[in-house]
Image (spheres, rainbow, N blue to C red):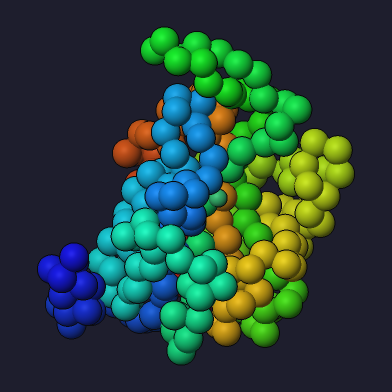
Amino acid sequence: MPSWRFVLFLSPWLTSAAFAASVAVDVGHYREKPGVISARGVTEFEYNLQLAREVVEALQRAGHEMLLIGDDGLAEKLDARAPRADGWDLFISIHHDSVQPPFLSDWDFEGVTLQYSDRFSGFSLFVSRLNGHADASLKCASAIGAALRGAGFARSRYHADPIVGEDRPFADEVNGVHYFDDLAVLRTANIPALLFEAGVIVNRDEELRMRNPAVRKKMVDAITNAVGVCLG
Ligand SMILES: [Zn+2]
């Protein structure tokens, strides 16, 4: 939408900040393959788009230059996304999480049979050691994890488990950061890059938290503070 781009590019001149960075925010998945289906039947893409827009708005208000990638929801090669941010300071891909299929159960929600698991919850962050800026990527992922914990959010932990997760080793266990070396969107980024799983939307309580604007604001404020810390 032209007016959105107009606001994005003009606003750094309208606000002031102690430190201004350029940050690209990627909306995970696209309409045709929208990722996880939540416990209440909403696509992950819709959750990703909502949160990504709020992250962009908050960072923009803090004086940073922002690029939003994938908000049109059109099919796009995943490895073509991150290179669009070449020359920027940081690439953040926004996602919402699921669990391994054996842990999903059926329930009826508003007359529709859907799948859920209340066993796992929490945020996760991923970085790739195949990214050319692995140290800077980890620094920002750790800063975001620390800020989220400080705001009262819990890390998920289960992705590191070889049985219930995907055996993704911890890069920073305290702050919920894992290595996921082959993740295309991180591996193909030519700048520091991280993937953020905001919460587990097949978890019925966590999905309600992710829908709560006040919860998202706390999350977005933490991310905004962390970006200022890690890039400042
Ligand atoms: Zn996803």
Q: Nearer the viewer, residue 226 or 163?
A: 163
Quadrant in the rendering for residue 85: bottom left
Q: Which of 72 and 196 is in front in this view?
A: 72
How many numbered marks appear?
Answer: 0
Percent x, y of residue 109? 45, 14
User: Which residue sits at x=28%, y=69%?
Assistant: 60
User: Which residue sits at x=61%, y=77%?
Assistant: 188
Q: Residue furthest bottom?
A: 87
Residue 81 lies left or right of residue 7; in this view the side is: right
74 relative to 87, above or below: above
Percent x, y of residue 228? 44, 72
52 relative to 16, above or below: above
Percent x, y of residue 25? 42, 66
Residue 54 visible at all = yes
Percent x, y of residue 189? 57, 78
The N terminus, quarter of image: bottom left
Residue 89 visible at all = no
User: Which residue sits at x=17%, y=79%?
Assistant: 10
Q: Residue furthest right?
A: 162
Q: Nearer the viewer, residue 193 or 78?
A: 78
User: Which residue sits at x=13%, y=68%?
Assistant: 3
Residue 93 lies left or right of residue 120; in this view the side is: left
